[in-house]
Every structure is written in structure tokens, then in C-alpha cells.
Amino acid sequence: MADVLTEEQRRKNMQAIRSVSKLEEKIAKELWKRGIRFRRNVKDLLGKPDIAIKKYKVAVFIDSCFWHACEIHGRIPNTNTVFWVEKFRKNKKRDECVNNHYLDLGWSILRIWEHEVKADFNGVVDGIADFISSAKDSQS
């Protein structure tokens, strides 16, 4: 099915998509308040992890249910279905390649779903803090 938006409308829609979600912002602020220091969306790291600590080889990704095709909440839009199926397949393949890249380099990698953050924000932040702490201890 053809796109129902003009090329200009589609461009504006895509430009409006933020590279940093509000959930990522909220998690980062809470971790920072807890004294955990990190970098966000590090451009020179593959996949631009949402939270990264190079010193301890830690990468944390917060995956949206839509863009990363969550098995529970992901959905395929009704228009341009062929495009979206392929897009989500490529996104999942890219995520897998990114995971393998970091694991091969001895990094600790954590992926969190958007719905997990929404269901239990404090639990997720505690989990990230524990993950970083254990990765830090294993590097020492």
C-alpha cells in the first residue's frame, strides 16, 4: 500500500521523532541522583548505547516496544505493512549484531524494554544500578 502522506509530511513526521525518549531521560536523571556517572548516547560506540561507562565496559539500551518490535506490545502499522515488517526485521537483526559486538569485546550489556520501565520504574532503576555495580566489581 502506498504511503498516505506526502514526502514532505513524512519527512516532518520522522524529524519529530526524538532520539532520546522521555523514559531514557527519567532513568538517566534517577541514576545520576544516585551518584552513578555515565555517558549517554555515545556516538563512538556501536549502537549508541543509551547509558555507557567505557571504564567498566557497560552498555545499557532502553528499547521502545514499537521500534524494537516487542513481542508483547509491538505492532505493525496498517499502512505500508511490507516496509514496516522489513524495518522491524532489520532493527532486530541490528540489535543482535550490536549485542554480539559488545559481548565479543567483553562488555556487560543490558537491554530493557519500555514496558518494563513503565510497569516498575524504581525496580528497573534498581536493576540498572545493580547491573552497573556488578560490572564495576568484575572489572576491578
Image (tube, grey):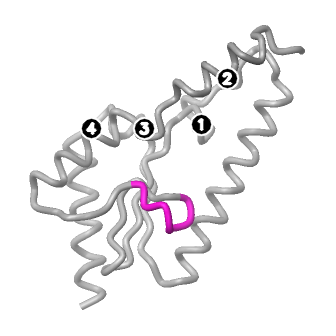
x, y (%) of residue 139?
30, 88
**Could you tell me what secondary structure mostly forms the magenta stretch?**
loop
User: Over which residues does the magenta segment extend?
Assistant: 41-47
* As drawn, 70 above or below 131: above
Q: Residue at x 31, y 80 (%)?
A: 55
Q: Give the farthest residue toward the right.
A: 1
The quadrant in which the C terminus is found is: bottom left
Q: Name the disc covering residue 67, or none.
A: 1
Horizontally, is 111 left or right of 29 in the view? right
Q: Give the farthest residue toward the top.
A: 4
Q: Give the farthest residue toward the front.
A: 8
Mark sitting earlier along the chain (4/3): 3
Q: Residue at x 34, y 33 (%)?
A: 22
Q: Secondary structure at mark 1?
A: loop
Q: Nearer the viewer, mark 4 or mark 3?
A: 3
Mark sitting earlier along the chain (2/3): 2
Q: Three-letter amino acid code at disc 4?
A: Asp
The quadrant in which the N terminus is found is: top right
Q: Three-letter amino acid code at disc 2?
A: Arg
Measure the C-alpha gap from mark 4 to mark 2.
34 Å
**Mark 2 in CB contact with mark 1 (< 8 angstroms):** no
- Mark 3 highlights which residue? 114
Mark sitting earlier along the chain (2/1): 2
* As drawn, 48 above or below 138: above
Q: Residue at x 41, y 66 (%)?
A: 59
Mark sitting earlier along the chain (4/2): 2
Q: Secondary structure at mark 2?
A: helix
Q: Residue at x 29, y 66 (%)?
A: 131
Badge 1: few (under 14), some or many (20 or more) residues near its Cα, within 10 Å? Answer: some
Measure the C-alpha gap from mark 2 to mark 3.
25 Å
- Mark 4 highlights which residue? 120
x, y (%) of residue 83?
82, 30
